[in-house]
Image (tube, rainbow, N blue to C red):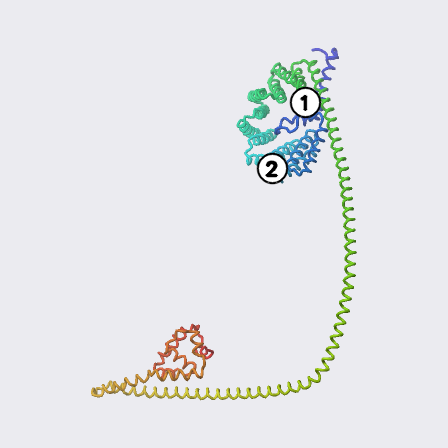
Amino acid sequence: MTDPNLHPTRSCRQRATRILLLLALIACSFSRTAARISDIQLREAPLNHSFSLKPDSLYLALKDQYNLAVQERNRSSQGALLEKMGELSFHMGQYAQALEYYLDASQLFRQDNKQNELAYNYIYLGILYYYNRDTTRSNNYFRQALSRFRQQKDRKGLAIAYGNIGFLFEKARLYDSASHYQNLALKEYHTTNDKAGMAKIYENIGSIYEDLSQYDSAMANFRKALQLYKDDDEKILHIEVLNNIGDIYRKTGQYKEALSYSMKATAISRQSNERYQLSSGYRDIAKTYKLLGRDDSAFYYLDLSRKYLLDIYSHESSMQVAFLQAQDDVRKKNREIEKLNNAQRINTVITISVVIIIILLLAIGLIILNRQKLKIKNERSLNKQQKEILETQNRLMQADLKAQVLGEEKLKSELLAQRLEREKLDAELKNKALEETLLKEQIEVKTKELSTNALHVIQKNQLLEQLKTSIGSLVDDEKRDQKKQLRQLLAQINQNFSNEGYWEEFKTTFEQIHQSFFEELKKTCPELSSSELRLVCLLKMNMSSNDMATMLGISTDSLRVARYRLRKKLNLEQGGNLVAFLQNL
């Protein structure tokens, strides 16, 4: 075994190689954001790759365009420009500023109902939250974007959303779900024949198989991606796939093939001036030489990788400083503009205030002048009215003197006329009282006459009833020679019971006493028969049931039936007093 102390140069190189590898990993962590952007899918970048050379100038140009869009009140343009400034801030590592721009853009897109632009903006927000290690919000924004792409039937947007959701599942080591969403994205890209998109999905699927140590499947997908990038002439993404293929060869122990692909990747990176890919390629070459046992070559390429990483870090730092300086200049400019605007607004307010004060003073002066004129006019009018009042009072006093003489005579005549009128009124009242007395006496006479007639009818009917009963008993006797004459007498008595002439005389007398009774009764129930009207008259006179039955020539049972029918026709409720109802008519 060789003593390492005998070969100090080789031992120092080995230690230096380890130190450089450590420095390279540390330096890599500073530029990880920019180097890993290709892992998650964006839509076509609205910014050119040249933005990284002069981001400050690009930011100022975008800011000027945004201010112009604000002046024109074009919300769609404002949202698009805010989104571009957010993307620029994102690439410069200013995540807080990028988030503010993206959120402002999404609000404008919502106000303008630009659902498709809003969906792409959610993709940007999802990517931003992913790099801030907030995968929950990142997934939420990707899902919202997916929902809107479905509504808009944007297949390319669907593919981007599926790919990003699959990427999140891959980082969470949920490889089945990751593979499912990557395949959905691949299907959408196939539909639109987007070769670059298909290539990126094949690359993502290859990464999944690589994580699962299924290197054959990973290699197959990486080669599909490589071929599609070649067909689409995508040199930058082409470099990354070459590095991935080199990694697969290195992990499977095929170091020469790995070295070949890493060399191809670095050659294309030098031609394209892609410092990130060049640094990554040199690092992969150094790893491969280390595995081949060629430490000198590993040290050389690791030193190159470190050099490029330091250059990248220095370049990024200078760009970020320039970008921050540009933002600070914009803020200062905005503050100065705001100051000028405030000063202009203050001057405008002062000018308007002065004009308003002058107008108010003029108005107050005119009001005072008009009030003075009105006061003088009112005083003149008042003096004229007072003069007219005095003249009128004088005329009235003279007229009063004349009227006093005539008034006394007129008063005497008026008093005499009032006395005559009062005497006439007293005479009329006496005549009216006399008429009322005579009317009452007539009513009393008619009432007595009506009662007398009713009494006579009752007595007559009672007598006839007795005769009817006696004759009926004779008729039932066996003496047949008297039956015919007795039947004739019985018929005459029955005829006498229904003498209509008497009832007409009775009704006439009743109406004289109870005026308008039958009119009110007909308004209540116009369908009463003559026999029911007779019953009503007798009820109005408050006769007993026996007397009413005798006058009507019916039995008391028939009288109860007649009263029941009358109550029903008059629509009286059960328990209502029929006599009281008729007395109130």
Residue that sits furthest to the left in the current view = 481
Q: Amino acid at mark 2?
A: Lys
Nearer to us in this view, 140 or 541: 541
- Locate residue 339 relative to residue 438 in the image: left or right: right
Residue 556 left/right relative to 162: left
Query: At x 62% / y 37%, what residue is drawn?
Result: 109
Instruction: Choose top left, top right, bottom left or bottom right for residue 147.
Output: top right
Residue 487, image quadrant:
bottom left
> Residue 573's x, y, as percent?
44, 72
Q: Nearer the viewer, residue 532 or 276?
A: 532
Instruction: Residue 569 in the image: state x and y as whole percent.
Output: 40, 73
Q: Which label was assigned to residue 276?
A: 1
Q: Which residue is mark 2?
A: 114
Please state if 120 lies on the left or on the right of 307 as rendered.
left
Label 2 – label 1 distance at C-alpha? 36 Å
Q: How many marks?
A: 2
Q: Quadrant of residue 21?
A: top right
Instruction: Name the disc covering residue 402, or none.
Output: none
